[in-house]
Image (tube, rainbow, N blue to C red):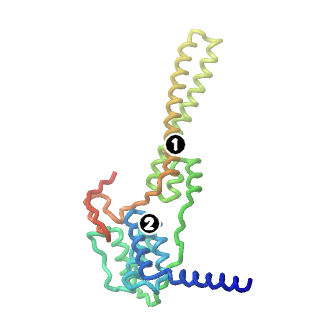
Amino acid sequence: MTGSFKFVLAILIMIGACFSQAVTQDSLEIMLGKAKDHYYNGEYQSAIRELENALLYLKQLKQTDQVEAYKYLAFSYVAFGDHAKAKEQFKKALMLNPELALDPATVSPKIIKVFEEAKAEMAASPVTEPVEPVPRAVKEEPSGFDATIRSCCVGGWGQMYRGEKSKGTKMMIAWGVTGGITLGTWIVASKKEQTYQDLRSTNPSAYDDAYEQYKLWLNISAASTIVFLGVHAYNLFDIIFRKPNIRTSMTEPEQGFICEAAPDRVKIGYNLKF
């Protein structure tokens, strides 16, 4: 029994040793590559998580890779509008490479503005402390269940919760307008019903006309209800079956020609703002 225990212990030690060596330069470069892919696909939360994982092994990263990690982490924070954290990452990159510059041909003016502000702040108050790894999971992934529950209650709320503010706002407006119209038409239909019911005994000659008015508003109410339910169903379909598409103008101009370079592709086109 003792011999078996020692054998199992030895196997566990060997496995642990293998895992301790698992984070090699190659694997770190793969992590950085995945982070860039997430970034260029607009998956900024995934990019942040991948970059944070890489920066946990800061001392194993080549200096050029450290600069790249901090740079793309800053890019991703700009996407969420968190300019303070973006500046922190730009400053760390500049500490490692004071000559760092961004190419206006491939980087949006929004990013360059934050980068220049970080450089100006460093010039005014030089940072001398060593660069430390960023804390893990700075920005949590919104829960899909929580987003779904919100959208079940109010259309567009779940989209806004998971970061799709523009889509969520439009969907919430559509949900509110169609819901309000539906409620209003049913109130009118209810009053029309009461009117024709009262006329049945008091004024039979006006009964038929009142009944036709009731049927008209009943049909309007039914149609508005179908439209409202369609909007709500689309809202639920979107929150359940579609992945968040959180994009900003950070990687491309709001309107105009696009020329974006990635490590493995070049994106050229024309962007229209609607």
Q: In the drawing, does residue 112 fall left or right of residue 38?
A: left
Along the line of sight, the residue nearer the viewer: 57 or 1: 1
Q: Residue at x 49, y 71 (%)?
A: 49
Q: Residue at x 48, y 46 (%)?
A: 173
Residues packed near mark 2 inside 10 Å, few (<14), some (14 to 19) or many (20 plus): many
Give the spatial CA distance, label 2 vs label 1: 28 Å
| Residue furthest out toward the right | 1
Q: Quadrant of residue 194?
A: top right
| SS at mark 1 in the image | helix
Q: In the drawing, does residue 263 fall left or right of residue 204?
A: left
Along the line of sight, the residue nearer the viewer: 54 or 253: 54
The percent coordinates of residue 42 (x first, y second) are: 40, 63
Residue to which mark 1 is pinned: 233
Identify which amino acid the numbered label 1 is placed on. Answer: Ala
Identify which amino acid the numbered label 2 is placed on. Answer: Tyr
The percent coordinates of residue 256 (x first, y second) are: 26, 59
- Assess whether mark 1 and mark 2 are in contact (beta carbons under 8 angstroms): no
Q: Which mark is residue 108?
A: none
Residues packed near mark 1 inside 10 Å, few (<14), some (14 to 19) or many (20 plus): some
